[in-house]
Image (cartoon, rainbow, N blue to C red):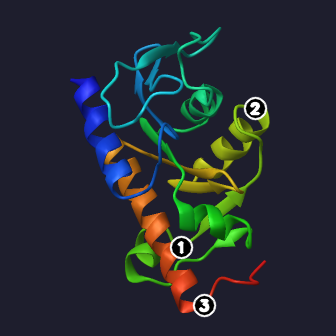
Amino acid sequence: MLDREFERIGKRLFMEGLVGANFGNMSVRGEGGFNITRTGAYLDAGDTPAFVPDTGDAPHEASSEYRVHRAVYRETSHSAIVHAHPVHAVAASLDTGLVLPVDSEGGALCPEIPVVTGDPGTDEIAENVAGALRDGHIVIVRGHGTFAAGKTLDEAYIYTSIAEYACRILFLSGRLRGVL
């Protein structure tokens, strides 16, 4: 069942251009840990996720971003995470430290999207993302991608999509360039 849910959301992410090739990852909190996509997996392929315990070593097949997912689950009540690489959101993160959506959906559902720093797969990115998601659902890591969290993978996917749409609107309207 979980395999199909990962595949369904992975297909949506891929079809909407929110991920490419084998970029990105997803996870769902479970008893004593969480299930996460495997390293190098194509999100739309429906591979069986790897289980990562709340503490201790992660299995080698787990996504290299397992540290972020573990930190978010440790510090928040979120139950699902989607990490994507939406082009406009990544581009926006290069020009601003805070994205302020001007479209109606973005303004209503995520009026502020923080931008944090950190190299992929490090404790720094894990701490920064978890801190930003304590009081929110979406964050952009500068030059890297988004991490969205919610009660379900569907909710995390929706926040990912909203962030990309909001950044696209900002670029098309000319409102983002030069805002720091």
With 54 as the anchor, is 126 left or right in this view? right
Q: Decide: few, some or many residues near mark 1? Use Cα within 10 Å; few <14, some 14-19, many ≥20.
A: many
With 27 as the anchor, is 140 left or right in this view? right
Q: Nearer the viewer, residue 27 or 30?
A: 27
Residue at the spot 41% in from the left edge and 57% down from the top edge = 17
Disc nearer the start of the sequence (2/1): 2
Dot 3 falls on a residue whose secondary structure is: loop
Confirm whether residue 136 shows in the render: no
* Location of residue 141 with respect to 119 vertically, above or below: below
The quadrant of the image that shows the C terminus is bottom right
Q: Nearer the viewer, residue 32 or 43?
A: 43
Query: Could you tell me residue 132's position as x and y percent?
Result: 65, 51
* Location of residue 50 with respect to 81 vertically, above or below: above
Q: Decide: few, some or many residues near mark 2? Use Cα within 10 Å; few <14, some 14-19, many ≥20.
A: some
Based on the displayed image, in which of its 4 quarters is residue 165 positioned? bottom left
Q: CA distance from mark 2 to mark 1?
A: 26 Å
Q: What residue would you read off at disc 3?
A: 174
With 62 as the anchor, is 140 left or right in this view? right
Residue type (three-letter) at the residue carrying disc 3: Gly
Q: What residue would you read off at disc 1?
A: 167
Query: Could you tell me residue 4's position as x and y percent?
Result: 23, 29
